[in-house]
Image (cartoon, helix red, strand yellow):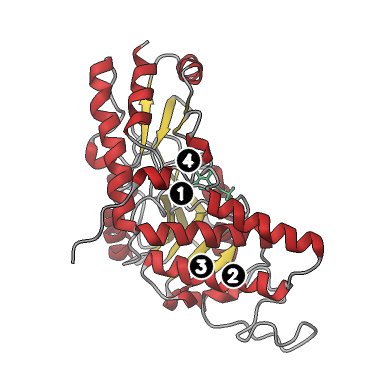
């Protein structure tokens, strides 16, 4: 049976951020939709009145874990709950088994939360090999020049936050497989907008306050089951149990064998918000969202030629985030703002991010503002 057409106008109406402006900055933060705001508000009300149950608030973590697993088409036990991408990268980096002569290969222009945790391993003896960006691109060929039999791990973002450049994930998986190197993917700028395959990837992590529509303070770490036990929990705590909530004091210390061993305590309002954001995303479906987001980005890219501009990358290299190199990025951003278009400047790029609540009018407004 054919799926009923989605009423995008009704979906858009759930996002107050769309009312007064073309909000094209989900790559900085996803604006809170009404269902998320309502879930958080009702929690805050219970919290303030002392009527709620902390246990019920905490158990929302399991709802989120299951929803993240559904998004990644994997099992809940392969997902750890974390407060930030850097916590996920730090967990893997700090406990990565070290052998003399081992190296870590990472893109030089990565967002720092996916860069410093790896560079920090120099103090443990790892050699850090930086992969240069070539005209804003992070290329598998450049990784291939640096990955060898002594590479313990390769770290890269699926989509670069500075520019929207999309990595050749299959190519990198293949390279890591050939050298038996672990692969860590930062999916902060993709999961929620694009489908992210787990096949061949050891760790996938992401902060959830952008494309997954969470308030700030939630993230996840997917760990391929064969890889979980080799990492000790970095910050074990009262949740480091196979059977949570059974006891809170003293021994035994028996971390679960899977990714749940890396869980950290949850900031309840945030996770309650994330559960609602994920519900909305799963209802729409990842394929539908990907088509919508890429479709809007593509419409914008096509329109750029009409205003005498060019997107930075080819269609195969681009994502739902469109980076634009212009002579005066700040001046362009101000002119966009005067026309009620919210876009970011990162490095040499003006960055336009398209999520499913955006529509053609946002694209046209941005193009119109670039024309003047
Ligand atoms: C690629 C990428 N990773 C991670 C983050 C956020 O990192 P953290 O959760 O450590 O603040 C961002 C934020 O812009 C990002 O763009």
Tag 2 residue: 61
- Could you give the CA–CA distance between mark 3 and mark 4, rounded to whole angstroms? 40 Å
Residue drawn at x 47%, y 42% is 110
Q: Earlier in the sequence, mark 1 or mark 2?
A: 2
Percent from the top left, x then y, of residue 84? 59, 55
Judge whether residue 354 can be spotted in this image: yes
Decide: marks 1, 4 in contact (CB < 8 A)? yes
Q: Nearer the viewer, mark 3 or mark 4?
A: 4
Query: Within 10 Å of the Cα at label 2, are there few (<14), some (14-19), or many (20+) other Cα atoms?
Result: many
Q: Earlier in the sequence, mark 4 or mark 2?
A: 4
Residue drawn at x 46%, y 19% is 336
- Could you give the CA–CA distance between mark 1 and mark 2, rounded to whole angstroms? 18 Å
Decide: marks 2, 3 in contact (CB < 8 A)? no
Tag 1 residue: 211
Outermost residue, top side: 372
Query: Within 10 Å of the Cα at label 3, are there few (<14), some (14-19), or many (20+) other Cα atoms?
Result: few
Closer to the camera in the image, 358 or 265: 358
Tag 4 residue: 26
Closer to the camera in the image, 174 or 53: 53
Image quadrant assignment for residue 293? top left
Tag 3 residue: 99
């Amino acid at each position: 049976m054919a799926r009923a057409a989605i009423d995008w106008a009704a979906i858009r109406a759930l996002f107050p951020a769309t009312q007064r402006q073309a909000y094209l900055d989900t790559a900085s933060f996803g604006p809170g939709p009404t269902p998320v705001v309502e879930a958080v508000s009702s929690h805050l009300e219970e919290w303030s009145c002392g009527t709620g149950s902390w246990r019920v608030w905490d158990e929302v973590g399991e709802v989120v874990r299951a929803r993240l697993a559904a998004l990644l088409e994997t099992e809940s036990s392969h997902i750890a709950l974390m407060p930030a991408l850097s916590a996920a990268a730090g967990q893997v980096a700090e406990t990565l088994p070290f052998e003399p002569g081992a190296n870590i290969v990472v893109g030089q222009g990565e967002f720092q939360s996916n860069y410093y945790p790896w560079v920090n391993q120099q103090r443990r003896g790892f050699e850090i090999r930086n992969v240069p960006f070539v005209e804003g691109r992070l290329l598998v060929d450049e990784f291939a020049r640096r990955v060898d039999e002594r590479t313990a791990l390769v770290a890269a973002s699926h989509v670069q936050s500075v520019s929207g450049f999309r990595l050749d994930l299959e190519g990198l998986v293949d390279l890591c497989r050939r050298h038996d190197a672990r692969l860590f993917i930062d999916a902060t700028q993709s999961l929620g907008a694009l489908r992210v395959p787990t096949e061949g990837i050891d760790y996938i992590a992401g902060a959830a306050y952008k494309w997954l529509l969470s308030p700030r303070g939630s993230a996840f770490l997917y760990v391929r089951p064969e890889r979980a036990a080799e990492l000790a929990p970095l910050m074990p705590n009262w949740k480091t149990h196979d059977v949570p909530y059974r006891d809170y004091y003293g021994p035994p210390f028996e971390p679960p064998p899977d990714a749940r061993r890396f869980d950290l305590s949850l900031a309840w309002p945030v996770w309650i918000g994330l559960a609602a954001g994920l519900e909305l995303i799963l209802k729409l479906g990842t394929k539908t969202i990907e088509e919508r987001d890429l479709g809007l980005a593509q419409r914008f890219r096509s329109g750029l030629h009409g205003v005498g501009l060019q997107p930075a990358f080819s269609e195969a290299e681009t994502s739902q985030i469109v980076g634009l190199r212009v002579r005066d990025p700040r001046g362009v951003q101000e002119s966009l703002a005067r026309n009620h278009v919210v876009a970011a400047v990162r490095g040499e790029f003006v960055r336009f991010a398209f999520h499913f609540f955006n529509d053609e009018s946002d694209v046209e407004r941005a193009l119109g503002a670039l024309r003047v």
